[in-house]
Image (tube, rainbow, N blue to C red):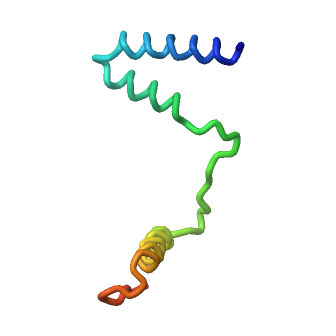
Amino acid sequence: MYKKALYDARTAYYSALIEENKNNPQFLYSTVARLTKSHSSVEPSIHLTLSSNDFMTFFTNKIVAIREKKSPDPPYKYYR
């Protein structure tokens, strides 16, 4: 019951806040960003030794893996 009352109060508060600032995109964006940000106490980190090529290779390999799962016999060869 307490959780529901707290949830309802927060919903009403943010609904009113958004309604009052509906013509202020910067405020709305920052409010939504604040409400949806991760509540993790550990910040994600990227190793400094990784290069932009490593980053690109990671995503290229992900795409290739997804395509291979989707179509076991692709019409052309993907290069890694």
- Position above or below: 44 against 65: above
Q: Picture coordinates of residue 21 (x, y %)?
A: 35, 14
Residue 16 point in image, percent of width and height: 43, 10
- Residue 30 rendering spot, x and y as whole percentages: 43, 27
72 lies above or below 45: below
Q: In this view, does 42 lie to the left or right of 19?
A: right
**Residue drawn at x 52%, y 28% as measured from the top left:** 35
Relative horizontal placement of residue 47, taking residue 13 as reference (left or right): right
Q: How many marks?
A: 0
**Left or right position of 40 against 25:** right
Q: Which of 17 and 53 is in front in this view?
A: 17
Q: Looking at the image, which residue is at 47% across and 32% down? A: 33
Viewer-side residue, 29 vs 65: 65
Q: Which residue is drawn at 64% across and 46% down?
A: 43
Quarter of the image for residue 74 reads bottom left
User: Could you tell me which quadrant the C terminus lies in?
Assistant: bottom left
Q: Quick check: 48 above or below 18?
A: below
Residue 2 in which image quadrant: top right
Which quadrant of the figure contains the N terminus?
Answer: top right
Residue positioned most to the front: 1
Could you say where residue 70 lies in the image, as x and y percent from the top left? 42, 75
